Amino acid sequence: MSPLASTPKQPYYAVIFTSLRTHGDNGYSDMANNMVQLAAEQPGFLGIESAREGLGITVSYWLDLESIKQWKANAEHLVAQKLGREQWYTSFRVRIAKVERDYGF
Amino acid sequence: MSPLASTPKQPYYAVIFTSLRTHGDNGYSDMANNMVQLAAEQPGFLGIESAREGLGITVSYWLDLESIKQWKANAEHLVAQKLGREQWYTSFRVRIAKVERDYGF
């Protein structure tokens, strides 16, 4: 089980990715694991949280918009995005949001 | 299975609530369902998406910060927040974020 992401003092950015999957794996699980590993190596990456219960939600955290833009343009990630649109998701939404406040324990 | 939230043109706000649960239900499921219903009745509520896979992620969407503030101060919600801190969560984080961009299909 993943821990909660440990993010720095705000402001920072969140990419909220919500999706519904097609039936069957079709290479999805391996690619999803690879993308988490690859994202974590990118400049400006701060953390990631993910859960699927029918609906899937992955929130990745980033230092700034430029980091998000670079990650979206990553060559391997572009391949994954294409397969996502063509094969893995019946629907998805990406929301890019500036985290202005956080608290918890 | 919940659908993806249908949100309006940005900007709007997201409350990203991530948590790890204690063992046992202890009234959690009923309260969680009640809170989703109650949130949906609040002014400024735009939608909600939720999944738990060990780590739980609930993202609720709101028109503005004032709506979020009012919901946080709701009397029944305050009871749920107290029980959450005392009984249901080993850790959690609330992130309040302004959605600046979204896309998908």
Image: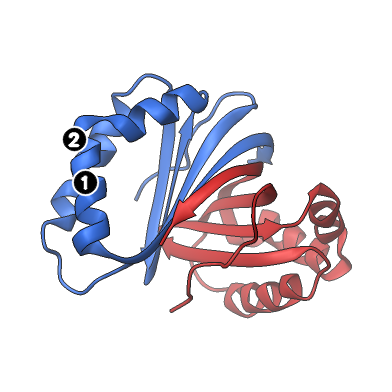
Chain colours: A blue, B red
Relative vertical location of residue B40 with respect to residue B74 in this rendering, above or below: below
Image quarter (top left, top right, bottom left or bottom right) of the C terminus of chain B: bottom left
Q: How many C-alpha atoms fall within 10 Å of the one at disc 2: few (<14), some, or many (≥20)?
A: some
The image's mark for residue A80 is: 1
Residue A63 point in image, percent of width and height: 51, 23
Kind of residue at badge 1: Ala
Residue B44 point in image, percent of width and height: 79, 63
Residue lying at the far top in this picture: please name it. Answer: A43
Kind of residue at badge 2: Glu
Determine the residue positioned at 64% across, 55% down: B9
Q: CA distance from mark 1 to mark 2?
A: 7 Å
Determine the residue positioned at 37% across, 63% down: A52
Image quarter (top left, top right, bottom left or bottom right) of the N terminus of chain B: bottom left
The residue nearer to you, when weighing B46 against A47, is B46
Q: Quadrant of residue A85?
A: bottom left
The answer to whether tags 1 and 2 share a subunit is yes
Residue B74 point in image, percent of width and height: 86, 64
Q: Quadrant of residue A35?
A: top left
Q: Quadrant of residue A84?
A: bottom left
Residue B30 point in image, percent of width and height: 63, 80
Contact, mark 1 vs mark 2 (Cβ under 8 Å): yes
The residue nearer to you, when weighing A91 against B16, is A91
Callout 1: chain: A
The image's mark for residue A76 is: 2
Relative vertical location of residue B63 with respect to residue A64 in this rendering, above or below: below
Per the image, label 1 sits on a secondary structure element best described as helix
Determine the residue positioned at 41% across, 29% down: A69
Per the image, label 2 sits on a secondary structure element best described as helix
